[in-house]
Image (cartoon, rainbow, N blue to C red):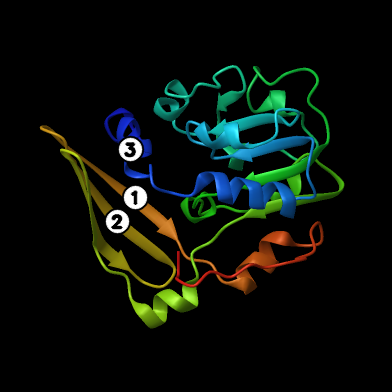
């Protein structure tokens, strides 16, 4: 998933996403944090939209995405679900900087949570007391009402087709085909969660303080 062939096309197919607007919203919604841990950050290309005084460190499972990042000194390949309670982040990846301590904000944005079938790691986030965890989810209720259609996108001579293979209201399996003179294909399993699931993941360590809904299920 997000292997070399698809990773190199990821930013191309998302070039029209309003990253600047969304990052400005996350920064303000998260209380204008000074230290952010970004989970599943991909290439982290959108970090440029945070203020320059914000210290950012990322965890990304795809080695191919990390390899394409301009922030390789702060973007580490690792699996966030392997974080242990009370352990320093260096236990997850020895490259984490020594200055790393309690953080103001953790983020898992742009569908990260949907890729994770295991969410018992939330309590292990090294957040300071009163810190925030901001993430986004597909709106499961809207998917049930509106359905899930295949999607086609062309950028220049690059084409991507996302086809639904399986849907059981707990998980979606998607086939992603990319054509650019060559042909690449990946299978992505995405999990669907509702508010009851989120409250279960939050446990006693988090309070659900705010929700911003979107017009569509994405």
Residue 30, placed above or below residue 34: below
Mark sitting earlier along the chain (2/1): 2
Mark sitting earlier along the chain (1/3): 3
Spatial CA span between label 2 and label 3: 19 Å
The residue that disc 3 covers is 12
Q: Secondary structure at mark 3?
A: helix
Residue pictured at 65% horizontal, 36% vertical: 50
Q: Secondary structure at mark 2?
A: strand
**Local crowd size for mark 3, using a 10 Å CA cut-off: few (<14), some (14–19), many (≥20):** few
Q: Is residue 121 visible?
A: no
**Local crowd size for mark 1, using a 10 Å CA cut-off: few (<14), some (14–19), many (≥20):** some
Residue 174, placed above or below residue 52: below
Image spot of residue 64 (x, y percent): 39, 26
Image spot of residue 17 (x, y percent): 43, 49
Question: Which residue lies most toward the right here?
Answer: 129
Q: Quadrant of residue 63?
A: top left
**Local crowd size for mark 2, using a 10 Å CA cut-off: few (<14), some (14–19), many (≥20):** some
The residue that disc 2 covers is 174
Q: Between tags 2 and 3, which lies in front?
A: 3
Left or right of residue 64: residue 110:
right
Labels 2 & 1 near each other (Cβ < 8 A): yes
Left or right of residue 108: residue 179:
left
Question: Which residue lies most toward the bottom here?
Answer: 145
The residue that disc 1 covers is 188
Mark sitting earlier along the chain (2/3): 3
Labels 1 & 3 near each other (Cβ < 8 A): no
């Amino acid at each position: 998933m997000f292997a070399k062939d698809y990773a190199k096309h990821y930013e191309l197919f998302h070039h029209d996403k309003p990253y600047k607007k969304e990052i400005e919203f996350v920064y303000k919604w998260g209380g204008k944090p000074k230290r952010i841990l970004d989970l599943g950050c991909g290439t982290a290309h959108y970090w440029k939209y945070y203020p320059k005084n914000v210290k950012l460190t990322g965890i990304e499972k795809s080695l191919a995405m990390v390899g394409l990042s301009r922030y390789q000194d702060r973007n580490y390949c690792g699996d966030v679900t392997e974080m242990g309670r009370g352990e320093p982040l260096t236990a997850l990846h020895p490259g984490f900087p020594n200055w790393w301590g309690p953080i103001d904000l953790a983020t898992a944005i742009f569908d990260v949570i949907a890729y994770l079938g295991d969410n018992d790691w939330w309590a292990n986030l090294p957040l300071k007391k009163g810190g925030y965890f901001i993430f986004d989810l597909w709106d499961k209720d809207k998917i049930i009402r509106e359905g899930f259609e295949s999607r086609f996108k062309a950028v220049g001579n690059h084409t991507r087709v996302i086809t639904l293979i399986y849907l059981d209201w707990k998980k979606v399996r998607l086939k992603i085909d990319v054509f650019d003179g060559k042909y690449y294909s990946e299978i992505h399993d995405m999990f669907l969660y509702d508010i009851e699931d989120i409250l279960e993941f939050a446990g006693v360590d988090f309070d659900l303080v705010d929700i911003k809904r979107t017009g569509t299920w994405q």
